[in-house]
Image (tube, helix red, strand yellow):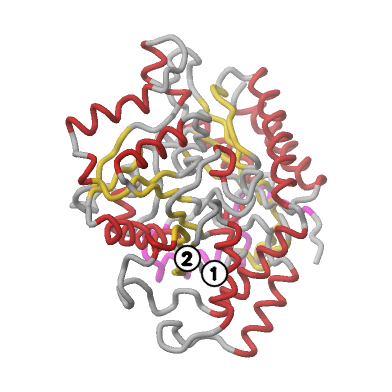
Amino acid sequence: MTMEFKPNAAGLPGPKGQALLDRKAKIVARGISNSTPIFVDEAKGAMLKDVDGNTFIDFYGGIATLNAGHCPEPVVNAIKEQADKLLHTCFMVTMYEPYVALAEKIAELAPGNFPKKVMFANSGAEAVENAVKIARSATKRSGIVAFECAFHGRTLMTMTLTSKVKPYKFGFGPFAPDVYKVPSAYCYRCYYNSTYPGCGMHCLERFDRFFAAEAAPESIAAMIIEPVQGEGGFLVPPKEFLPGLKSICEKHGIVFIADEVQTGFGRTGKMFAVEHFGVVPDLMTVAKSIAAGMPLSGVVGKAEIMDAPDPGYIGGTYGGNPVSCAAGLATIDYLQSGNLADRSSALGAKSIERLKALQEKYPMIGDVRGLGAMVAMELVKDSKTKEPAKEAAGQIVSECYKRGLLLLGAGIFGNVVRMLMPLSITEQQFEQGFAILDGVAAEVLK
């Protein structure tokens, strides 16, 4: 399936889309937001077509769920084949091979030369919830350390771990107990660098104070961090940060959890982002691009930690559904056979180059950052004060949509524009997308 690029310049839904919007307004809960009024009819690769025939270049990739692109043929075929044989049983009652086969593949891919085990769930939040449960069971401790600018999900525990009040936490308290927040390595807005010259990794030094003032290390079960913080603004830490955190965890017997829900499966130029930092987590959560859009998530880690809960203490009715597992196996094969992690590195390098060129023209682009094809620009009203330019970021996303390019905002201040294009995007689609962004930037940031 090929799609001619035909954007909806007016930015308004057509008659079919408007009819669906009207139906949605009457029946779908108001709390479910929508960045655009698009109702998608079909999609392929890095292109979407709405119900009125308008097409769009996808630079948001289902929020990092579509590293393999929309509807990759081998994955679709695997889904069809598995659906003909078995849709569901519940692995906790009657088992099936795709669950075991995918667990073997994930354990093989995950960093670390030690025995590993795997469990599957449905969403990234479920994976994080289970990782916390497993760590608490293994350590017989309850405290969890998370980081400012984090996003881990919308359930009670994961909402507590998340570090953005609106829209994720406001009005939903009280939150889960025994969770502690510490500063992340947000280098562009580092308080310490404004006080001390150079990067002294003061975000690591703070842990001595934290353990003295907030929580004793022997009460902490786990520390969880995204190797590149996603919703927080695509924050790439210094190369010393994650190894420093792992060292702290090892010193105090704390389980180190890498949340690779958004960064995994080739997004950053390696299969998992922790590989860039030479860090081997004790537990790792995976989801999103594991199965090209099918609902599937998992936890993988050291066998002795994963085996801490007794039988029946973790699991779920739909976790590791056979169709999703078949999709996961086909997706991983597609990513590997197509060398899409290498493609991610190339796309990321070109994206950074293009955004740096825009930054030279427009001082409102305060920072350009990324790892692989996980790239963003942070907008500010003033380059010295770094006052967030949330409105400008929103304008860029909105105007790009009207011209046929789908982007998303991010950042705790809402002033970051992020890019998560499918790794299967063509050169022509990539160039078309950046041509649109260049034109919009010239209008909004001038």
Quarter of the image containing the C terminus? top right
* Labels in figure, total: 2
Dot 2 falls on a residue whose secondary structure is strand
Dot 1 or dot 2, earlier in sequence:
1
Residue sitting at x 31%, y 35%? 182
Secondary element under disc 1, as helix, strand or loop, is helix
Q: Where in the figure is residue 150, as x and y percent of width and height?
A: 39, 42
Q: Residues within 10 Å of mark 1 (few under 14, many from 20)?
A: many
Q: Residue at x 71, y 55 (%)?
A: 46
**In magenta stretch: residue 388:** no
Where residue 328 sits, quadrant-wise, is bottom right
Instruction: Tell whether 354 sits left or right of 259.
Output: right
The image's mark for residue 400 is: none
Frontmost residue, 154 versus 409: 154
- The residue to which callout 2 is attached is 117
Magenta stretch contains residue 15? yes
Q: CA distance from mark 1 to mark 2?
A: 7 Å
Callout 1–callout 2 Cβ contact below 8 Å: yes
Work out whether 397 lies above or below 257: above
Amino acid carrying label 1: it is Ala
Q: Quadrant of the N terminus?
A: bottom right
Question: Whole-percent x and y of residue 395?
Answer: 54, 36
Local crowd at mark 2 within 10 Å, few (<14), some, or many (≥20)? some
In the rendered image, the vertical position of residue 274 relative to residue 350, given as above or below: below
Kindly identify which residue carries mark 1: 103
Instruction: Tell me the residue at 28%/50% (across/down).
Output: 221
Q: Is residue 401 above or below residue 194?
A: below
Q: Tell me which segment is drawn in magenta.
A: 5-32
The amino acid pointed to by label 2 is Lys
Residue 407 in view here: yes
